[in-house]
Amino acid sequence: MPEMQMRVSDEDRERATGQLQRAFAEGRLTRPELEDRLELALTSKTYGDLLGLITDLPAEAPPADDVVELESKSGHVRRSGDWAVPRRLRVSSKYGSAELDLSQAVIPHPVVDLELDLTYGSAKIIVPEGAVVNVDAFHTEWGQTSVSDVPGRRRPGTLYVVVSGQAKYGGLRVRYPRRRWFTH
């Protein structure tokens, strides 16, 4: 059976509708075009039906599920502000530390796996309010792991960060963003 005649799944329809909605948000489709195409996408039965709705649109961005590795031998690894957090992030530094601020980052996944490999450095992770962080798979020989008031048990509808790895002579600190008292 040719691939274009194979039946699509609900996930395939969802992926196509997401691509159509992004195209509308970018100004590539008008509202009537979006509505027509969404109706057809949600009722499509084959890959050929779906493909006809999105072939004139730019290809979808590569999935953010790939593993991203951040490495430094003697410097610090820092990420903050508006940055895209991958599904899996590996950070390694022999003599430096890692500071990852997720509080203003774009996080399209409900779960983020963060693997740390630090020899002589420490790590600080700032998570958005309400996020949950599990540090059970993180080990340190000479440092300590501090999680402050951040819960570790998974809750539905919240960001769940799983931290694993090690720090031989450093520690791990996880916290929520600091509240600023004098901002308007």
Image (cartoon, helix red, strand yellow):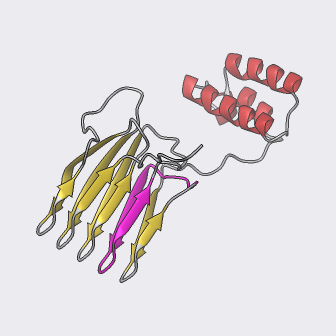
**Residue 65: horizontal and vertical position, in percent?**
48, 49
Indicate whether 120 appears above or below 122. Answer: below
Q: Nearer the viewer, residue 37 or 167?
A: 167
Kindly give the residue lying farthest to the bottom in the view shown. Answer: 74
**Is 84 on the left or on the right of 71, as rendered?**
right
> Residue at position x 25%, y 39% from top?
152
Q: Quadrant of residue 166?
A: bottom left
Q: Quadrant of residue 5?
A: top right
The segment highlighted magenta reads 82-101
Q: Is residue 20 left or right of residue 66?
A: right
Would residue 121 appear left or right of 79 to someone viewing this image?
left
Tell me if residue 65 comes above or below residue 7 in the rendering: below
Q: How many marks?
A: 0
Which part of the image, by quadrant, shows the C terminus?
top right
Q: Check the picture and name the quadrant holding the N terminus.
A: top right
**As drawn, 146 above or below 31:** below
Q: Nearer the viewer, residue 79 or 165?
A: 79
Can residue 156 be seen here? The reply is yes
- Counting from the top left corner in percent of width and height, residue 125 is at 36, 56
Query: What residue do we see at 31% from left, 58% from top?
Result: 115
Is residue 2 something one can see in this rendering? no
Where on the picture, by quarter, is residue 96?
bottom left
**Camera-nearest residue between 92 and 38:** 92
Residue ranking furthest to the front: 182
Say whether residue 49 is magenta: no
**Residue at the extreme left of the image, as rendered:** 141
Q: Which residue lies at the image location 17% right of the left edge and 73% below the top edge?
A: 169
Where is residue 104 drawn, in percent x and y? 53, 49
Could you tell me residue 159's position as x and y percent?
Answer: 41, 38
